[in-house]
Amino acid sequence: MTDLEADLRKAVRGEVGFDVTSRALTTMDASNYRRVPLGVVAPRDADDVAAVLEVCRTHGVPVVARGGGTSIAGQATGTGVVLDFTRYMNKLLSVDPESRTAVVQPGLVLDRLQDAAAPHGLRFGPDPSTHSRCTLGGMIGNNSCGSHSVAWGTTAGSVSELDVVTARGERLRLGQGWAGAPAGLRELVDGELSRLRTGFPELPRRISGYALDALLPEHRADVARSFCGSEGTLGVLTEAVVRLVEAPPARALAVLGYADEGAAAEAAAGLLVHRPLTVEGMAADLVPSAAALPRGGAWLFVETGGSSGSEARARAVEIVRAADVLDAHVVTDPAGQRALWRIREDASGTATRMPDGSEAWPGWEDCAVPPPRLGAYLRDFRELLGAHGLRGTPYGHFGDGCIHVRIDFDLLTRAGIGRFRRFSEELAELVAAHGGSLSGEHGDGQARAELLPKMYGDEMVALFERAKAVWDPDDLLNPGMLVRPAPLDTNLRFSVLPREPVDVAFGYPADGGDFSAAVRRCVGVAKCRTAGSSGPAVMCPSFRATGEEAHSTRGRARLLHEMLAGELVTDGWRSTEVRDALDLCLSCKGCRSDCPVGVDMATYKAEFLHHHYAGRRRPASHHSMGRLPEWLRRVDRVRAAAVVNALASVRPLAALAKRLGGITPERRIPKVATETFSRWWDGRNAPGRNARGTGDLVILWPDTFTEHLSPSVGQAAVRVLEAAGLRVALPPTVHLEKPPVGDGRTVALDPVSLLRGRGRVCCGLTYVSTGQLDRARTVLRRTLDLMTPVLETRAPVVVLEPSCAAALRTDLPELLHDDPRAARLASRVLTFAEALERLAPDWRPPALNRPVVGQTHCHQHAVLGDTADRRLREAAGLAGDLSGGCCGLAGNFGFEKGHFEVSRACAEEQLLPSVRQAPRDAVVLADGFSCRTQLEQLAGVRGRHLAEVLAEALETSPES
C-alpha cells in the first residue's frame, strides 16, 4: 500500500488520502454494505483520472468512482482506490438555453444544475429525493429517475454525450451512432441482435443489468445511453453533456386520499392519461402527522403544470374529478407544496424506523413492475412479507410502477441473515413473474446483481459479462458489481459492530439504550450534506461551512461506526480521528430534527468526549467555558463583576486570559452583569413590597446566561408574564424537607421565600456540551433535589434561554434516565412563548407593527419548536419569518481556539445576510445569548430576546 500511495502522489495533482479518516469516510454508502478501501483520491481533472487508472492498473488495485455516496445497493463502496469527484470535479461548465443542454462534471450536485437552469425556464428532468446532495455522475452511473420520471423519463433519456476514461486509459466521447464505442462492442451487439430485441422487459423503470438494447440500430446505437446505469463498471465518467427540459411556469399539487396503499396503487396507472408531472404514493406509516393531508390511509401526490397558476390548478382539479378518492386537496401555494414534498422526500430516512421504533433496512428498495400490475404486485409482495414474518411500508413512484421499501430484516444474526437471503431470492422470482425489474432506480450493486439470472436468464447475464470484458478486460472497475457479483449476504456493514451494548452515560431511550443502535441510525441518505440552501433547516452547519465529509453528520456517524468496529479506527474512545471530526460539531442538534432518522450528533459528541477525556487532561476551554456557571457564581459571590470587566478591557490581560482559557483571540470576552437577575429579583420582591400577579404560578428558570450575562432578558420576561396576569416565582435555592401542598398557591412557593439560600439550579448545558458528564449528572441531581417541591405542584417551568430549555427537555432525562424526577421536570419546561399561549390564552401583546429579522434558535428549531413563537410574533404585529441555519457561536464552540473562521462562516450562511438586508426599522430578534453575541461581535448589531421587545412595547403602550 505504501508504494501505491507514493505512486499516486507522484502521478496526480489532486488529493490522495490513505489516512484512517479518509478511508473510514468511504467504507459505506447508503446501503447495507461495507468495504474498507485502501485509499481515496480526489482528482482535479480527466488527466488525474487517467493517471489514477494507470497506477492502479499497474498495481492490480481496483477503482471505484463515487459521487454523493447515496447509492442504496452498495455500488459506491470498494476495497481498492475510491475516486471522490465531489471535491474538485464538481463544476457546471456551461448552460446553453438555445440548445437546452448543459455541460457538467461528475461531482456536480443536481440542485446546483437546477439553480443554474431555472433562470432560463429550464431544468434537468430526473430529480431523485436526494437532489440536494446527489451528483450527476452518480445519477448517470445508476440511471437515476426521481419523482418526475412519468413526465421526463430517466437520466439515460437526458444524456447526450459522455466523456469517459476506460480502465486501460483510452479516452472516449460516447454518443449515438456508435460514437465512442470501444473496439469489439459493435461486433458483440451485431452477433446478438435477436436476444437484445427480445430479452428485456418493457417497462419505464427497467434499470437492472446493462442497457445493451440501447445499442440496437432502431435505438440509434446510442453508446452514451447504454453506458448509463453501468455503476462505474465500464469506464470512469469525466464530463457529460445533458439535455434540459422546459420547466412549467406554474404547478399545482393534487393530494389524493385512499383507504390503503393497494387502492392507491390500483388508481395510479389510470391517472397517466392526464399527463401529470408526478404520481407518487405513500402510506400513513411514513407520515409523522397526517394533519396536512386529506382523509385516508395512503395518498397519491399528483403534480400538474401549466403556463399559469389557474391552468395548473385546473389540471389538478380535473385529476381529482377523474380519480375515485376518499378525499383530496389541491395545493397551489408553493410553500405548501414544498412542505408536502418534504414529507415524501424524507421517506427514505423515516422508513428506516418502523412505527414501534424497530429498525428497517434497504436491500429491496426499488423494484419496478409495469404500472398496471402494481396493485397486484403489492398484494403478492405483502403476502411474501407475511410468509417470512417481515414488515415494510412501500412508497415511491406509483405512476411508474416503482416501489421503495425498507424492511425490518435482522441483519445482525446468522438466522436473520439467512432469512434475508431466502426472502431476496423469492422476491426476485416474484418481480420477474410480474414482468418487472429488480432495480427501478438505484441500480443492482451487490444487493441484487446476484439475482439477475432470475430476471434475465443465464444467457443474457453471460452476455453482460462479455460486454464488461470488452470495456474493462482487466476487471479493474468496481469488480463484484453487476457481473460476477459478490453474494448479497456478504460484506454487511453491521457484522463488524459489537454484539453487546457498549457502556455509555446517556440512556438512548429511542435505541433501547444501545449506543451501537444509535450510531446505526445513520443510513447514509446524506441530507446533512445539503449546502447553500435557504429556509428553516439547520443541519449541518459545519459541513455547509467547510464542504468536507468529515464535518457532516453522516461523516461523523461513519467514524463512530468504524470506532465501534475497531478494524480501521483501532483506538476506540481514545481515537484522535473521531475527536477531530467531532471538533467542528456545533452541538446545534439540527440533525435531531432535520435528519430523517433523527441522528443526534450533539449527544454522540458529548458521549465521546466523556469517554475520550476520562482520566486525562482536558482542553483549557473545557475548564474555562465548560465550568462557566461555577466561575460566574464565584464572581457574583465576591461582587467582582466590575473588576472582571475592567480587567477584560485591558488588551494584554484579556489576551493572556484567552490564551490560558483556550479562547480564540478574535473574540471579545462578554461583560458580566454587575447586578445579577436574582439580585434584581430579590430587591424587587423585598419584604413589604406588593405582591404581583394573581393568576397561575410559573417558575422562571434563572439560567446562567440570563442570571449573569443578560439579566435584562429575565427582567423583561417578568414584566411581560406579570402583565399577562401570571404569578412569577424563581426556583428554590435550598432543599426543602417538606414539599408544598395543593397546587402551588401556598406560602412555600412565595417569590420571596423561594430565593433564600445559596443553592442554584442549573441545566448542566455547558458540562454536557464539553462531555463532562459525571459533573453534569452531579449538577443535575442537585437541581432535581432543589426542584422536588416544585415538581409536587402543577407549576410549569419557563426557560428563557433556548439552549437551556433544550438541555432540560432532552439531555436531562436522557442523562438521568434512572431518576423519574428528570422526566417530570423535562415535561414541565415551557418556552416564554409557550407559557403565554398556554397559561394566558386571552392576553394580547402590545402591537408593534414592525418587520422582524433574525434567526430561529437552533434548539428551538430542533427540540423545542417555534410554533408558539411565530403566533406570538404575529399577534404583536411583528411581520416576517426568521431565517434558518445556525448563528455559528453555539455556546462555547465559537469561542474555542481554532473555531473562529468556521463560526463566522456559519453566521454568513443565513443570519448575517438576512440582518444586512433587513429594513432599517426591523426588529432584530435573537432569543439565544450566543446568537446575540454573534450579532454584536460580527455585525455590530444588537439582537434582543422576544421578551425584551414586548416589555419595551408595554412600557410605551397607553394601556400599560
Image (cartoon, rainbow, N blue to C red):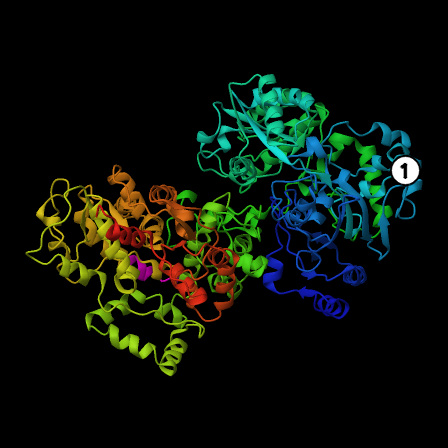
Between 281 and 716, the residue placed more toward the observer is: 716
Between 936 and 524, the residue placed more toward the observer is: 936
For the point 29% across and 50% down, the residue is 950
Between 298 and 251, the residue placed more toward the observer is: 251
Residue type marked 1: Val
Give the dominant element type of the magenta stretch: helix, strand or loop: helix
Query: Image check: 635 left or right of 41?
Result: left
Indicate the secondary structure of the residue bearing disc 1: helix
- Residue marked by disc 1: 189
For the point 25% across and 55% down, the residue is 716
Q: Position of residue 921 (x, y in %)?
A: 40, 55
| Extent of the magenta region | 770-778
Q: Is residue 510 magenta?
A: no
Query: Image check: 292 left or right of 138?
Result: left
Q: Residue 395: tell me if it is visible.
A: no
414 vs 810: above or below: above
Q: Residue 627: tell me if it is visible.
A: yes
Q: Position of residue 415 (x, y in %)?
A: 55, 37
For the point 56% across and 50% down, the residue is 533
Q: Position of residue 60 (x, y in %)?
A: 78, 59
Q: Position of residue 610 (x, y in %)?
A: 40, 61
